[in-house]
Structures are given as C-alpha cells and as structure tokens.
Amino acid sequence: RVLDDIQREYAAYDEARRSAISLYERGLKDEASAALESNHARTQHFWSLFRSFGGLAKADAESRLADAQRNVRWLGRVLVATSIAGALASLLVGFWWARRITKPIYELAVRLESAAERTRIQISPTRGGLDALGDQIAALVTKVEETDAALVEHRQRLVQTEKLSAIGELSAKLAHEILNPLAGMKAALQLMTREGPSESVSSAVLEVATALNREVTRVEGLVRRLVNYSRPLALRIEVVTIEELLRSALEAARRTLDAHAVTVTVKEEAGLPPVEVDPLLIAQVLVNLLTNAAQALAPTGGAVEVAARSVVVLGRREVAIEVADKGPGIPQSVLPNLFKPFFTTKPDGHGLGLALSQNIILEHGGRIAARTLPAEVGGGAAFEIQLPFVR
Ligand code: ADP
C-alpha cells in the first residue's frame, strides 16, 4: 500500500514537474516557479512516504529475520529432540537385542557351570566372559569324549569279564573232572617208575610210563593254568614305586633271562609318581613280557630294553612301561590274536601268558598293547602297559 502511495505521489510529482517545465518553456516564468514551489511540498510528502516505506521495509525485514531465527531455533530443538528420541530408541532396541543374545548365553553359562560342577571340570579362572564360556564348552566336550572312550573301554572290560566268568565256570568243572583222575594216573605212573625195571615192568614199559608221566604233568599244568587264568582276580592293592615294580620283576625273571643270555637295560624317567597296584600281579605281567622277549631272542640271546615314562591318557597322567626286544617282531596276521587265550605260535607254548597279562592290566584300569618296531630302529617287538598313577 505504501508503495502504491509512493507510485501515485511520484506520478503526480512528475506530472507537476512536466507542467512547470512547459510553463517555463512558454515563458510563463512566475507560474512555472509557483508550480515548482507547490511541487516542492509534494516532494517533501513523497520523501516522507519514502522514508516511512524504508522504516516499514526495515521492520518487515527484521520481523522476517526474527521469524527465520525462530524457525531455526525450532528446527534445532526438533533436531535435538529427534536425536534424543532416536538415541533412546536405539538404546532400547539395542538393549532388547542384547538381552535376546545374552539371555541364552547366560542360561548356557549357568547350565555349563552346574554341569562342570557335577563333572568336576576345572576351568581356568583367569579368563572371563565369552572366553570362559568357550573354555567351559571345550572342557565339557573333552570330558564327554573322555567319558565316551572310558565307556568303550569299560564295555570291553565287561565283555572280557563275562567271557572269563563263563570260561571260569566251565574250567572249574573240567578241572575237577580232569585233575582227579590225572592225580590217580600220576600216582600210579610214579609208583611204576620209582621201582625201576623189574620182572613185571620191562624197561620199554618204563620208558613209556616216564613219557606218560611227563605228558600227564604237562596236561595237569595246563589245566591249572586255565583255572588260574579264568579265576576272578582278587587284587591286593599297594602303593609302590615304578622302581620297586621293575626291580622285583627283573629279580623274578633273572633265571630265565640268564638262561637265554639276555641282558636288560632299564630307563626310568626321573620323578615318576608311585602307582596303586597289586605288585605281585604286575610283576607277573612284566615277567611274562620279559620271558616272551627272551624266547623271541632265542637261540642267540641279546638285549631287551625296559623303559618307564609318564604319559597322558584320556586326560589323566599314567605310567607307560615298555618291554622291547630285537627279535623277529610280530607278524601282521598274529597281532589281532596276541591276547586271545590259548593263542600261541610256540611248539610248547600254552597261549595264556598275554591273555592273563591283559586281564591283570585291565583289572587295574590300565591298558596293554603290542607293536612291531620298524626295521630302521633294528626291528623287534615292543609291549607297552599303561597304569594310572596314585591320584
Ligand atoms: P605263549 O608264550 O605261551 O605262546 P603268550 O600269550 O605269552 O603265550 O604269547 C602268545 C604269542 O604271542 C606267542 O606265541 C608269540 O607268537 C607272540 N609273542 C609274544 N611275545 C612276543 C615277542 N616278544 N615277540 C614276538 N612274538 C611274541
């Protein structure tokens, strides 16, 4: 509206100025100066309008600036508010997700802890958080694997025990049926042979009687071994050092070793803890292994190595005692039959030594295994027994 007024005033001023100029040009100087005079007043009005327009424009610009500033402030507040709301929302969503992820992990940790307590698994306390959880899972997996392996071993032991008790019953009956008449036969044969050749007993008959007596004694020995093998083992457990065990076994086998010209070297790892075993039975196993080694070295004799060291089996420390000879070794076809009762490749063997040894070792919660040594180290056979240390 002010601009319209200014325009109108300016048009009137211009008009008046033009008419004053035309008056002047026509020589009407007084009229022209009067007209200019009156136009001057209009000019004053025009300028005041212009000034007021300037004021208005300034006020308008200021109010627009204030509006803009208000808008900027408002926008700033909206921005801050949305950022806070966004942050809060992300926090909430984050918290919800974190709970979704951590809750099952926490539950798993609690269950693992109680499982670890039940299975008495030790977990390194130096680690925390997910590392500890990983440790627990790894420890439990190892425990499950160990338990699985122990179960398989236990089942084998049970089968062996069942087999043995069946053989035991049968052999006890058989032994009774066989040993009694054998005793009678032996007594008669001994009576015959003790007197020497006579009129009624020729030297030929005597020779047969002597041979019969030998055979009867051999059969009697075999039956007694069978009974001994299948009789349930009653262990007399003692705490003994490996050194004591090896010494008593070597002493017991001394005569056989000397007879076969066998020299034994013993290597014992330093600081081996003691074992909880029946010393007589374990010595019997070692004597059996040494006797077999000596027989494998026949007829020349030679060296046998006995080595004791600690090993870790199914997560527990055990002692491994190895008896190794430089004999012909064990053919591949023989290996699976070694520990079967009555398996023998010797003309006068009875095939019960290793079977009984295995029973004794299994009864102690240990293991026995055989292997043929490679030709690069001179060949031969090695038998290793593993027994748990005192806990
Ligand atoms: P036996 O000595 O009466 O034959 P064992 O049970 O002690 O009964 O041994 C079974 C078989 O295992 C032997 O006949 C032999 O074939 C084999 N054997 C045992 N020890 C050795 C060894 N050190 N080297 C080679 N073969 C062996």
Image (spheres, rainbow, N blue to C red):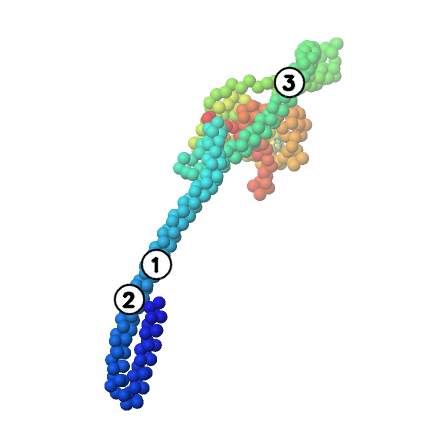
Q: Where, by quadrant of the figure, is residue 186 drawn?
A: top right
* Coordinates of residue 3 in the picture (x, y in percent): 34, 70
Cα distance in 3D space between marks 1 and 2: 18 Å
Q: Is mark 2 on a helix, strand or loop?
A: helix
Alpha carbons under labels 2 and 3: distance apart: 127 Å
N-term mark: 1 or 2: 2
Mark 1 or mark 3, which has the lower sequence index? Answer: 1
* Mark 2 closeness class: few <14, some 14–19, many ≥20 residues within 10 Å: few
**Is residue 259 something that shows in the picture?**
no
* Residue at screen point 32% across, 64% down: 61
The structure residue drawn at horizontal position 63% and vertical position 28%, both measured from the top left corner, is 339
Q: Residue 324 or 387: which is nearer the viewer?
A: 387
Q: Position of residue 113 (x, y in %)?
A: 46, 31
Q: In which quarter of the image is the N terminus?
A: bottom left
x%, y% of residue 208?
Answer: 73, 17
Name the residue tied to disc 3.
Answer: 168
Q: Position of residue 303 (x, y in %)?
A: 55, 34
Amino acid type of the residue tagged 2 in the rendering: Gly
* Residue at image mark 2: 55
Q: Tell me the number on the disc at residue 67.
A: 1
Residue 267 located left or right of residue 372: left
Q: Is residue 44 left or right of residue 327?
A: left
Residue in the foreground of this view, choosing between 153 and 279:
153
Check whether the beta carbons of the residues at disc 1 and disc 3 lie within 8 A of each other. Answer: no
Figure quarter occupied by ligand 1: top right
Location of residue 160 by image quarter: top right
Do callouts 2 and 3 mark residues in contact (Cβ within 8 Å)?
no
**For the residues carrying marks 1 and 3, which lies nearer the camera in this image?**
1
